[in-house]
Amino acid sequence: MKAIYLGIFSLALWSCQGPESPVEKDPLHLNAQDLGAPQDSLLIAKGGAQIDFTLPITEAGRYEVRLKASSSDSALIWIEDYIHNPDGRTYNITGNMLALADGSPVGIVGSPLDTGKHAMRLHVSGGKAQIESLSFKLIKKLQKTPAIHEQSMEGEEWDLVWSDEFEGSGLPDSTKWSYNIGNWGWGNNEPQYYTEGRLENARQENGNLIIEARKNDQGQAWTSARLTTQGKHAFTYGRIEFRAKVPVGRGTWAAGWLLGDAYRDELSWPYCGEIDVLECVGFEINDSTGLGKNHATCHTRAYYFKQGNQIGSEIAVDSMNTKFHTYAIEWYPDRIEGYLDGEHYYTYDKNANELEWPFDKPQNIILNLAVGGGWGGAQGIDPQWEKHQYILDYVRVYQRKGAN
């Protein structure tokens, strides 16, 4: 169906002044008139409609997006950000929100937004919707990372400089890890809801960290956890190791990786750089033997998967779900080398300019277990599974010994 263009509306909306706690900030609220409806009426939008608006954000962080709309034919509504971005990309920051027949509000949690004026577009598909309002509420303020560690790469041996051995009990160590939260799709159309501070999804137990994805949990199709050192620690160079067991099962997507500390929202990526050290999808792993593959990849503005030219490598891994394996990189000022259990299998050495090499700047460590999504769900999600566990023995960062 041909798109219906309804114009651009600039909105002078700011959160109120007050305490630093984001839960005390008033949401940015758009009514139907802000989106182009006549006075005292709802906005009627047919399938294929595109409604442009401008939203000023004064505080970077994670936002809850709430939509109040009704539809008798199950219209889907999603929000696109940075519609005039120079790369011509589509930044879907909500995934599909289903407009209900009774007009009950629906919400998406965790959408990342940086400060500044955002040119956005509301898309309607699959049916006609009556839109009453749209709001954006800050739920988690972006925290600057106080500890930046730059590792020396001079010397013959490795010296441990940072680690989490997961020897505690209960929730992960809050001096090392924070949480990315929500269900906005994470740039990959993933359906899971990442929780915060919930033992069922992330806990230390018997010397390990367990990240658990659970089906039909807490009112969500799936819950899981995504831990990050962002706001706590960031790293430049060094040897970084993840010792882990990953789950089998069609639809699982386990990862141990690094993302640039400069990430603020989707416009930041892949300019900020991404290094995938441990990345495994369940449909590539034999359910009986655990034989599967690990993928190491670097994503930069010059080379990344949405262009189809990412530079990566894969390696066979036996008993991925029953034996711990060590997934590692050695990150030098001019290259990144990937290893599995000490065996070298990957090199990224494109460093002619900052579009190829953003890796002279700090990166955060991330641990997560996703469900489905563009890659993890490429062969669907096994309807039989109820929960899966991603188990980590440790995460370690080394530098070369003997440095000044």
Image (cartoon, rainbow, N blue to C red):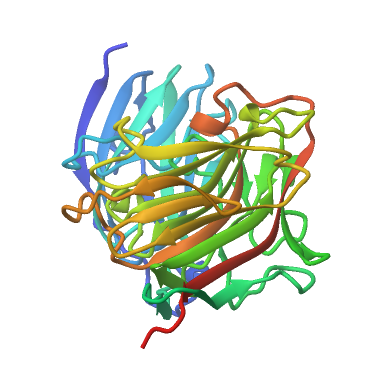
| Quadrant location, the C terminus | bottom left
From the viewer's side, name the closer residue of 53 and 42: 53
Instruction: Indicate whether 246 appears above or below 196.
Output: above
**In the drawing, does residue 217 fall left or right of residue 39?**
right
Nearer to us in this view, 165 or 91: 165
The answer to whether residue 62 is visible is no
Q: Position of residue 165 (x, y in %)?
A: 69, 70
Q: Position of residue 222 (x, y in %)?
A: 68, 40
Q: Quadrant of residue 172?
A: bottom right
Q: From the top left corner, tell me how far across and down residue 248 is, in percent.
A: 71, 35
Residue at 43%, 45% (x, y): give it: 346
Quadrant in the picture for the N terminus: top left
Residue extending furthest bottom? 404
Would you say residue 94 is visible in this rendering? yes
| 67 over 114 or under it: above or below | above
**In the visual, does 97 lie left or right of 133?**
right
Give above or below for 350 relative to 148.
above
Q: Residue furthest front?
A: 156
Q: Nearer the viewer, residue 57 or 145?
A: 145
Q: Quadrant of residue 204?
A: bottom right
